[in-house]
């Protein structure tokens, strides 16, 4: 509980009305320009993948709406970090989802 960002703000990602591309942009900035205390910049390949697996399990165990929201947000964050580290953009994932829509 409390601030989530190393800057003391409630979120590293600005207003709540951001889009996935905004999260991706911030994650890329943090990876490329590591500032002292940045959680995102401090994640290595092993730890981010471990966190993603942990969060996926927590999403599956979540029951209430607030729990699901909280855990899916964590899952999306860690998935976005892996994407950024791999050079995969949100629009690529979105296009893949669109191709599956009609199957």
Image: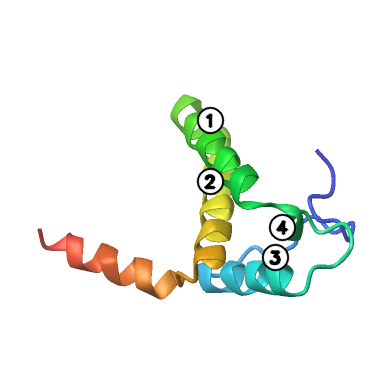
**In the rendered structure, are the residues bearing label 2 and label 3 in contact, judged by CB atoms less than 8 Å apart?**
no
Residue drawn where x is 55% and y is 37% of the image: 55
Q: Earlier in the sequence, mark 2 or mark 1?
A: 1
> Which quadrant is the N terminus positioned in?
top right
* Colour mode of the rendering: rainbow
Q: Which one is in front in this view, the residue at disc 1 or the one at disc 4?
A: 4
CB atoms of marks 2 and 1 within 8 Å: yes
User: Measured from the top left, where is residue 29 in percent x and y?
Assistant: 70, 74
Image position of 37 with respect to 18: above or below: above
Quarter of the image where one finds residue 94: bottom left
Find out whether the residues at labels 1 and 3 contact each other: C-beta distance under 8 Å.
no
* Callout 3: SS: loop
The nearer-to-camera label among 2 and 4 is 4
Q: Looking at the picture, how far across and down is residue 60, in whole percent?
A: 44, 29
Residue 76 in the image, given as x and y percentages of width and height:
52, 52
Element at badge 4? helix
Kindly identify which residue carries mark 3: 13
Task: Report the Cα–Cα distance between label 2 and label 4.
Answer: 14 Å
Q: Which mark is residue 58?
A: 1
User: From the viewer's perspective, is 4 left or right of 24?
Assistant: right
As drawn, 66 above or below 76: above
Nearest to N terminus: mark 1 or mark 4: 4
Question: Which secondary structure lies at badge 2?
Answer: helix
Of the numbered discs 2 and 3, the one sitting upstream in the chain is 3
Left or right position of 102 against 88: left
Say which element carries label 1. helix
Q: Label 4 near label 2: C-beta < 8 Å?
A: no
Q: CA distance from mark 1 to mark 4?
A: 20 Å
List the residue tagged with mark 4: 40
Q: Which residue is mark 2?
A: 75
29 and 71: which one is in front?
Answer: 29
């Amino acid at each position: 509980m409390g601030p989530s960002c190393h800057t003391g703000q409630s979120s590293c990602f600005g207003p709540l009305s951001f889009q996935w591309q905004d999260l991706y942009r911030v994650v890329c900035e943090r990876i490329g320009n590591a500032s002292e205390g940045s959680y995102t910049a401090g994640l290595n390949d092993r730890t981010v993948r471990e966190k993603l697996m942990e969060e996926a399990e927590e999403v599956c165990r979540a029951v209430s709406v607030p729990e699901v929201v909280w855990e899916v947000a964590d899952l999306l964050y860690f998935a976005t970090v892996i994407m950024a580290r791999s050079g995969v953009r949100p629009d690529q994932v979105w296009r893949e989802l669109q191709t599956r829509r009609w199957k």
